[in-house]
Image (cartoon, rainbow, N blue to C red):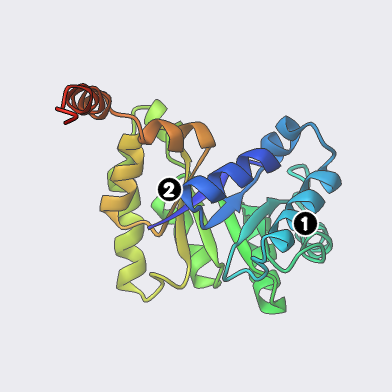
Amino acid sequence: MKFFLDSAKINEIDYAYNTFGIDGLTTNPRHIMESGKTFINAVTDIAKWVKDNKLEGVDRFPVSVEINPYIEDTEEMIRAAEEIAKISENFVIKIPCIESGIAAARRLEQEGIRTNVTLVFSAAQAILPAKNNSLFVSPFIGWKEANGEDCRKYISDIVEIYKNYGYYGKTQIICAAVRTGRQVVDCAVAGADIVTAGLAVFKDVMNHAYTTQGMGIFRNAWDNTAKE
């Protein structure tokens, strides 16, 4: 399983790459806002970070960047995606899972611009992006679980459908809006390709009360071991 960071802050990206070895990055308009930068400055800085770290190429370190969410016309989506894609060869364009978005993603893939169909909330929605050769599909987890839905079954269904029809591995499944370690495990068990989460989630996953307790026990033993 690959881990992507959900952020547009360079300090977080740098920390997550050097500490956890993240395999890619996902951003959205909220992350851009939280970076405190304009859209163009935020994505240009990310492109520079990728180049500085010698990670050029969508196969090496994909970076998902979302188009203006107000755009719903297919032709306008395509134009917006083409402009963003020019900034970096690592950029994968996030397109919403609506009818015009599916049409735009299909055309963009035919042009050689890789896409990530996002805001997917059902297994049925996940089928068309795969049929149209999108690089990624992003089923959201946290929002659905907060609504009392069974997300492990939801991801398992997408995985099974993809395996049934040869889409598995061709269109990679990114579990998005992941909030907890339990959700990370559920996505891994279900067979998702990627989990994307904020830095705080990755940090929290590493914490366990017994690990802390064990460190204390071993430190105490170390301190009380005979020195001579």
Q: Could you say which is closer to the camera, residue 167 or residue 98?
A: 167
Q: In the image, what residue type sits under mark 2? A: Ser
Image spot of residue 46 (x, y percent)? 73, 51
Quadrant of residue 90 within the rendered picture: bottom right
Residue 32 horizontal side relative to residue 196, left or right: right
Q: In the image, what residue type sits under mark 1? A: Lys
Residue under pointer 2: 122
Residue 197 horizontal side relative to residue 180, left or right: right
Q: Is residue 52 above or below residue 112?
A: above
Q: Residue at x 55, y 50 (%)?
A: 17
Image spot of residue 208 (x, y percent)? 28, 28
Residue under pointer 1: 48
Q: Is residue 134 above or below residue 45?
A: below
Quadrant of residue 134 within the rendered picture: bottom right
Residue 128 horizontal side relative to residue 67, left or right: left
Label 2 residue SS = loop
Residue closest to the far front: 228
Residue 180 horizontal side relative to residue 129, left or right: left
Q: Nearer the viewer, mark 2 or mark 1?
A: 1
- The number of callouts visible is 2
The numbered mark at residue 225 is none
